[in-house]
Image (cartoon, helix red, strand yellow):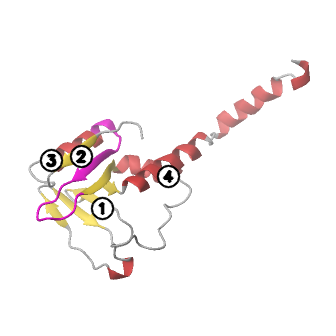
């Protein structure tokens, strides 16, 4: 990933979520966050990806992140998940998805970012980059073909 910033948040309260989201939005890059939840919940690592950056990645990535077939030991399968209520933290609302492990972050009713598992964020960014690098718009492709046509044959150079 372009810029790697690690942030530890005790819980997304007291403007911590606002600062982390502001950082992600300002640089337009993902921010790795480690949540240390209150009440004995296990720590959780996620990558906070601004909505515009995620939209760009998903535009260029030709397929969706492959779902795991079997849950890891100690994890519940998707069939055991129940609908979770949105969690509100100041001006933000976190919407955890039932399928997959993404969480949408909304502010004033607008999704501004998503929390993705680190492995999914890395995979999605890599796939988008690879596809985009192989793409040429029609004008660029025509100019490149014209350039190649003007080159002498390999044996005559």
Mark 1 falls on what kind of element?
strand
User: Which residue occupies 37% across, 81% down?
Assistant: 79
Q: Quadrant of the N terminus?
A: top left
Q: Is residue 69 magenta?
A: no
Q: Which residue has dot 4 on it?
A: 59
Q: Which residue has dot 3 on it?
A: 16
Mark 4 falls on what kind of element?
helix
Residue 41, visible in the rendered structure = yes
Q: Are marks 3 and 1 in contact (CB under 8 Å)?
A: no
Q: Residue furthest top?
A: 157
Q: Which residue has dot 2 on it?
A: 21
Q: Earlier in the sequence, mark 2 or mark 4?
A: 2
**The quarter of the displayed image where residue 12 is located:** bottom left
Q: Earlier in the sequence, mark 2 or mark 1?
A: 2
- Measured in 3D between alpha carbons, the distance from the residue under mark 2 to the one under mark 1, in whole angstroms, is 14 Å
Mark 3 falls on what kind of element?
helix
User: Which residue occupies 58% across, 40% down?
Assistant: 133
Q: Earlier in the sequence, mark 3 or mark 4?
A: 3
Q: Earlier in the sequence, mark 3 or mark 2?
A: 3
**Of tags 2 and 4, which is closer to the observer?**
2
In this rendered view, identify the residue nearer to me: 145 or 39.
Answer: 39
Q: Are marks 2 and 1 in contact (CB under 8 Å)?
A: no
Q: Are marks 3 and 4 in contact (CB under 8 Å)?
A: no
Q: Quadrant of the C terminus?
A: top right
Q: Which residue has dot 1 on it?
A: 103
- Measured in 3D between alpha carbons, the distance from the residue under mark 3 to the one under mark 1, in whole angstroms, is 17 Å
> Which region is colored magenta?
26-43
**Of tags 4 and 1, which is closer to the observer?**
1
């Amino acid at each position: 990933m372009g810029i790697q910033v690690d942030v530890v948040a005790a819980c997304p309260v007291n403007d911590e979520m606002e600062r982390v989201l502001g950082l992600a939005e300002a640089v337009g890059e993902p921010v790795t966050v480690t949540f240390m939840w209150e009440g004995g919940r296990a720590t959780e690592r996620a990558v906070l990806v601004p909505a515009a950056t995620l939209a760009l990645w998903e535009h260029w990535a030709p397929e969706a992140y492959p779902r795991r077939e079997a849950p890891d030991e100690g994890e519940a399968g998707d069939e055991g998940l129940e609908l979770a209520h949105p969690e509100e933290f100041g001006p933000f609302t976190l919407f955890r998805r039932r399928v997959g492990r993404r969480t949408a972050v909304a502010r004033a009713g607008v999704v501004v970012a998503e929390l993705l598992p680190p492995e999914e964020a890395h995979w999605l960014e890599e796939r988008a980059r690879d596809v985009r690098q192989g793409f040429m718009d029609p004008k660029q492709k025509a100019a490149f073909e014209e350039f190649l046509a003007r080159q002498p044959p390999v044996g005559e150079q």
